[in-house]
Amino acid sequence: QVHLVETGGGLVQAGGSLKLSCAASGTIVSINDMAWYRRAPGKQRELVARITRGGGTNYADSVKGRFTITRDNAKNTVLLQMNSLKPEDTAVYYCNADVGVYRLDYWGPGTQVTVSS
């Protein structure tokens, strides 16, 4: 079993920055991709950013140039640096990890990010 816990959410004014962290614990053989998703009120969950074990990244168009995803394979952590935040970035942000040879999917409980205008 793998547990993911996100930290770093909160309230920030538009134009501000936040850094989200996610730590994986438990029986971890190998984590493949790690990612951040978000769900805004009344909307479906969407991919924000993904990073492979080797460091390859991809981002949603809406966050390109503003958000940066990084990871530390030794510590089983993934970070999301969010700059130039906009009110439309307001959502619950979820950490996701794809684990092991069977690529099992794990999710954190989520952390709220609120951007005021």
Image (spheres, rainbow, N blue to C red):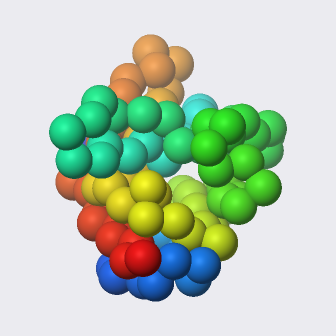
- The answer to whether 108 appears left or right of 24 in the picture is left
- Where residue 104 sits: x, y (%)? 38, 24
How many numbered marks, from 0 up?
Answer: 0
- Above or below: residue 92 compared with residue 20: above
Question: Can residue 56 be seen from the camera position used here?
Answer: yes
- Image spot of residue 22 (x, y percent): 44, 62
Residue displayed at 44% across by 56% down: 88
Query: 53 above or below 74?
Result: above
Comparing 24 with 26, the one in front is: 24
The quadrant in which the C terminus is found is bottom left
The x, y position of residue 47, in whole percent, is 49, 35
Quarter of the figure with residue 81:
bottom right
Q: Is residue 42 left or right of residue 35?
A: left
Q: Is 75 on the left-hand or right-hand side of 21? A: right
Which residue is at 65% across, 72% downward?
83
Note whether residue 27 is visible: no
Q: Is residue 20 above or below residue 26?
A: below
Q: Residue at x 45, y 58 (%)?
A: 89
**Pick the front one: 68 or 63:** 63
Q: Is residue 33 left or right of residue 7?
A: right
Query: Which residue occupies the extreme front position in the image?
Result: 117
- Decide which of 33, 91 is in the foreground and name it: 91
Corner quadrant of residue 68: bottom right
Q: Name the image quarter holding the N terminus.
A: top left
Determine which quarter of the picture holds residue 8.
Answer: bottom left
